[in-house]
Amino acid sequence: MPEEAEPVAPAVAPEHRPSFFARLLIFIGFVFALIVASCFGLRAMNVLPSFDNPFSDQTVDRSQPVLLESMRDLHRYVAADGTFQVIVDLQQNKENIPDFLVNRRILFVGSGTVETYIDFSALSGDALKVDNEKKTVELTLPPPQQSQAALDMSKSYVVEEDRGLLTSIGDAFRSDTAKQQRVYEMAQQKITEAAKSSGLDQRAQQNTQLMLESLFARLGYTSVKVTFTNP
């Protein structure tokens, strides 16, 4: 019987064979992938040092040097202070115009501190009476005064702000800082007024009495009497 001929694989047409350039690209891509995988593996094992992101955000401080505008001597003793919080609900609208068109309402939480101090620069010549034999001291001081509230912006924030359609469009073309400043001023005013009836003055008188007693006791005086004049 005649021998069967072995099947012959079909010849690949030259046009279907990968070109040398294509094979080179495949080889380069494989090598690059292998290098990247090796780097990540070595980095995970803390073999390679870490590198910063070349596209990370950068902050450049181009501020000018601080200038001293004024200096003054202070003759006050801060005897007490209080921290207050107030909610300012300010709404502005136009008469006979719907609120959804022209309206602005801001709900602001303000936190501020009020200091109560004694001004020693206002002392008269006979305000201090000292008896060295009896080791007694008599002081007549002016009444405590309160400073204006200082807002702490790190603890103050806007809870909600509603604006009408036309108000929102107008704000997109201008920055109205005057209204924001008005909200801050209202918060300061309300806190300053609330501090007057908070008992800070009585606390300041007590602390001043204790401070002066301790001061004169170190100087050898056994009796210290402090009197505050009426406001």
Image (cartoon, rainbow, N blue to C red):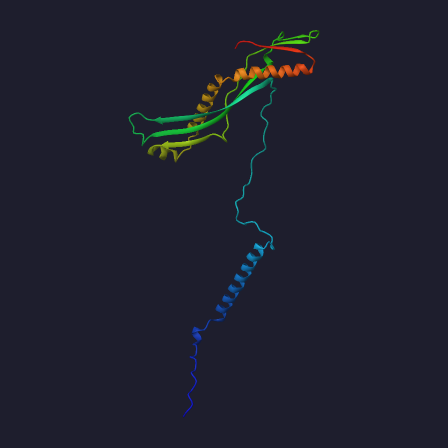
Give me the residue at 68% from left, 16% from top: 218
Number of marks drawn: 0
> Is residue 180 shown left or right of residue 38?
left
Given the current orientation, which residue lies at the most extreme bottom position?
1
| Residue placed most toward the observer, 56 or 37 | 37
Quarter containing the N terminus: bottom left
**Up-down: is 34 above or below 196?**
below
**Up-down: is 56 above or below 17?**
above
| Residue placed most toward the observer, 40 or 27 | 40
Picture quadrant of residue 14: bottom left
Picture quadrant of residue 107: top left
> Is residue 171 shown left or right of residue 202?
left
> Is residue 150 shown left or right of residue 175?
right
**Up-down: is 29 above or below 75?**
below
Residue 108, position in %: x, y? Answer: 43, 28
Give me the residue at 52% from left, 67% from top: 27
